[in-house]
Amino acid sequence: MKGLNCELPSSTNFIQSIINEDLKNNKNDGRVHTRFPPEPNGYLHIGHAKSICLNFGLAEVYDGLCNLRFDDTNPTKEEVEYVDSIMADVKWLGFDWDDRLFYASGYFEKLYAYALDLIEAGKAYVCDLNAEQIREYRGTLTEPGKNSPYRDRSVKENLDLFQRMRAGEFPDGSRVLRAKIDMSSPNINLRDPVLYRIQRASHHRTGDQWCIYPMYDYAHPISDAIEGVTHSICTLEFEDHRPLYDWVLDNVTVLCHPQQIEFARLNLGYTVMSKRKLRALVEQGIVNGWDDPRMPTISGLRRRGYTPEAIRDFCERIGVAKSNSFVDIAMLEHSIREDLNARAPRVMAVLRPLKVIIENYPEDQVEMLEAENNAEHPEMGSRHVPFGRELYIEQDDFLENPPKKFFRLAPGREVRLKHAYIIKCERVVKDEQTGQILELHCTYDPDTRSGMNNEKRKVKGTLHWVSAKHAVKAEVRLYDHLFLKENLEEDEDFRANLNPGSQEILTNCMVEPSLAEVLPGYRYQFLRQGYFCVDQDATAGQLVFNRIVSLKDAWAKIQKSGNN
Ligand code: ATP
Ligand code: MG
């Protein structure tokens, strides 16, 4: 732990400024203890990654601790599947809670005891109004609320009723326990908020042990305090709940009073970031599960081929602020490009093959040509790719009637084949009926082999290719944004804005033979095309790749134009 005499990190965001100040004043005896508190009602998304990086990151910076705590107070929406996926995702991101894995449900007995204390102190009461009546009595932003007719029940009666609520004597929704605070408070959260509700629902950890469940606003501060959390970091929508957070801790006997600090949640363009909406996408079959590579979930990004390093880098770049804003998805893509640019081996893959026949190349000859794995990183070595008489190039690397600035292949024109020779297009063979281009007949210049110090002639275009005889067939899945609109309004029907072209599956791709036995999770740069990752659907006989991201870096461009 960092004591007073340790050097504090120079503050880089407002939360660190707060913590630095606390450490200077020896608040919390110089401890820094945070927590990441997901509700296990869905899979984690990139917004949660921001919170994870922040909470675990602060613990790292200050030599403190960060707990993982499941906020599992709502049994109807929570499942073990979500608990397991959340743990796997936090670990994958590179963080560790050691032995500090907690559940709010682990505190149910304590929370109940604290509720009894509140009743005995005259600070909580059992209310028989139904949900609708409670809403009516609550008032509005401009009008104060009215006291519940049950507000002045005696302590004795309240104790008796609350104990009987727990014992299961009353039907669901018939009674609640409420804090007795102030029905005319300008802050609606303080107008006698509900602390407990009756709900007969099996809980994923406590089973049918309980038929009353605590509300988040009551369970959360006490859970923080029980764990000795010093800084309880949450998103901005909880700002108005902070007085209630503090009220709860001021009115029960706990050992410490954590400080709630709010920061702006992450919003990303062209996607949705609420578990409710993500769940709807999954349940309605709009995507293929929580780990669909188009999803902004951690599991979706992982399957797509994102690295934990790139996601952490992105979370670092976006920083922590006090006001909500939108983050350009190009920034996330920039992070993965930067990461993979340094470490992904370069390979050749033809996504939409067009046959090329080199007429002057000997029929049965095969040359193994050396190809570097990453020109910028010679230490990544090289491999050999076979070259033969029949090749595939990309369909759109050929145009019969090219515009002036088209430097790829066209009738009578020359291009270099990467790692190989200069070829010239001599003849186009078409389907007589449809006019479709079937193959190109070319010639090669044997004196132009790459790397032989005889690259005398310069040509403008260099194409990737594969040998037809040696190439391995693969499926390649191309992804685009899930939504057509960058900024979906909160109440907008998100289904209406789905991008029908968010997934394109190419089944006839041809990749170089060095990829024949790659394993799911391996990442490559397909030359001139982008970064790709072997999907988990790949089997020994069937290669499947996901496109993580194309090569064009929109974010770098945005930054450049911003600097001009
Ligand atoms: P959702 O709106 O997606 O359901 P939530 O806030 O209900 O999210 P929780 O499981 O309660 O989900 O979130 C756990 C933690 O992650 C909370 O501290 C929450 O503030 C934080 N968090 C959730 N979404 C974001 C986001 N978009 N950006 C930053 N932090 C987030
Ligand atoms: Mg929440």
Image: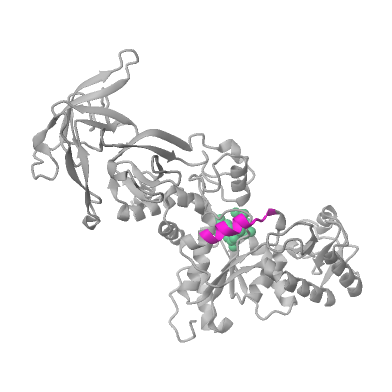
Q: Residue 265 at x, y = what percent?
A: 56, 58
Closer-to-camera residue (337/510): 510
Q: Position of residue 366 (x, y in %)?
A: 17, 36
Residue 99: image quadrant is bottom right
> Which residue is more in the foreground, 146 or 435?
435
Task: Write down which quadrant ligand 1 falls in.
Answer: bottom right
| In the foreground, 122 or 186 | 122
At 44% from the left and 84% from the top, the residue drawn is 6
**Number of disc labels:** 0
How far across and how far down the image is residue 238, in percent? Answer: 64, 62
* Magenta segment: 77-88
Left or right position of 217 against 93: right
Can residue 235 be seen at all in this image of the molecule?
no
**What secondary structure predominates along the stretch shown in magenta?**
helix
303 or 26: which is nearer to us?
303
Instruction: Give the vertical position of 135 relative to 370 (above or below).
Output: below
Q: Residue furthest top?
A: 433
Is residue 58 shown above or below 544? Answer: below
